[in-house]
Amino acid sequence: MPARHSRHPHLAVPSMPLSAVPAAEAELVAALATAAEEVPTVAQRLAPRFVRSEARRHAQAYLWGLLSPVERKNGWQLAEAVGDRTPYAIQHLLGRADWDPDAVRDDLRAYVIEHVGDPHAVLVLDETAVVKKGAASAGVDKQYAGVVGKLENAQVGVFLAYASPQGVAFLDRALYLPEAWTDDRARCQAAGIPDDVAFATKLALARQLLERARAARVPAAWVTADRVYGDDRRLRMWLEAQEQAYVLAVSGKEYVNVAATWTQRRVSTLLKELPEEGWARSHRPAGLRGLCAGGHRARGAGTGGGPALDHRGGL
């Protein structure tokens, strides 16, 4: 695979021969290479969001770096991937340059829907953590990090992904700020967090992401998430009020409505009582690989209505 070069001579994106990549990763590397070819088009679309030409160039370089085969996407690794000798340009873009990340998010969301939008798509809610050292990174605190399965000094972000038969992409993000941060305005100011940012739970952030997707008329048939969000009855009720079908995992301690008797039963008790024929096999739709389990078994009782981060929440 030949090396690709940007329109700017000093920006180059190195390529990795597919023969040097394990077979299991070759498909991903090929997909990233194809996506990287779209970077100049996307960068031109985003250009009006950046006042200075330097910021436009660095934004394009940043996109190329994110799509490169580099395993770790920190400042130094991204700088090397795009041919910079130091990470200062990318760090300036993410931390100090004048641009509106939410406006860029809106542009990218529109781009995603134009290319992979589908009325049968699924909105996928999830969170992830970035383990950090030190206490300066926005939102960093001792909190549960699913990536390591324990409490760690980490940043946590809530994400909304879009999965359709045409492809998968991120739509939105929100950085979780613990109360230890929002109660300390001096610390927030030092990290560049605006004064009007108040504390919000991860559940509240998840709903905000869904509300923005609905306001933008993102086509989707379903919403899905794990039990962290499925156990939130208010979220389920909100989805029902929006007439939005959903499949949310719930823990055994939750109560659900049994359609036959319209009574509430504890999930753990209900699962023990259902007969073997109460199971039905479900198959994942084409194009949703990696985002939902294929061939899983689901009980016949419904759960409700439906059959490196910075303070700017960079993706």
Image: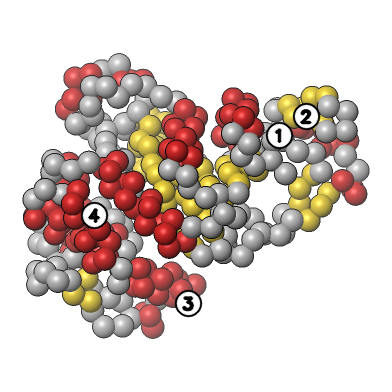
- Left or right placement of residue 104 versus residue 25 in this view: left
Residue located at (15% from left, 56% from top): 56
Q: Which residue is mark 2?
A: 257
Instruction: Check contact, mark 4 vs mark 3: CB within 8 A.
Output: no
- Marks 2/3: CA–CA distance: 46 Å
Q: Amino acid at mark 2?
A: Asn
Instruction: Check contact, mark 1 vs mark 2: CB within 8 A.
Output: yes
Residue located at (89% from left, 48% from top): 276
Q: Amino acid at mark 4?
A: Leu
Label 2 element class:
strand
Instruction: Check contact, mark 2 vs mark 3: CB within 8 A.
Output: no
**Quadrant in which residue 239 is drawn:** top right
Circle 1 residues within 10 Å: few <14, some 14–19, many ≥20: some
* Residue 304: mark: 1
Q: Earlier in the sequence, mark 1 or mark 2?
A: 2
- Left or right placement of residue 104 versus residue 167 in this view: left
Q: Which residue is mark 4?
A: 46
Residue 110, percent from left and from top: 38, 52
Q: Earlier in the sequence, mark 2 or mark 3?
A: 3
Label 3 element class:
helix
Residue 215: tell me if it is visible: yes
Of tags 3 and 1, the one toward the viewer is 1
Q: Earlier in the sequence, mark 1 or mark 4?
A: 4
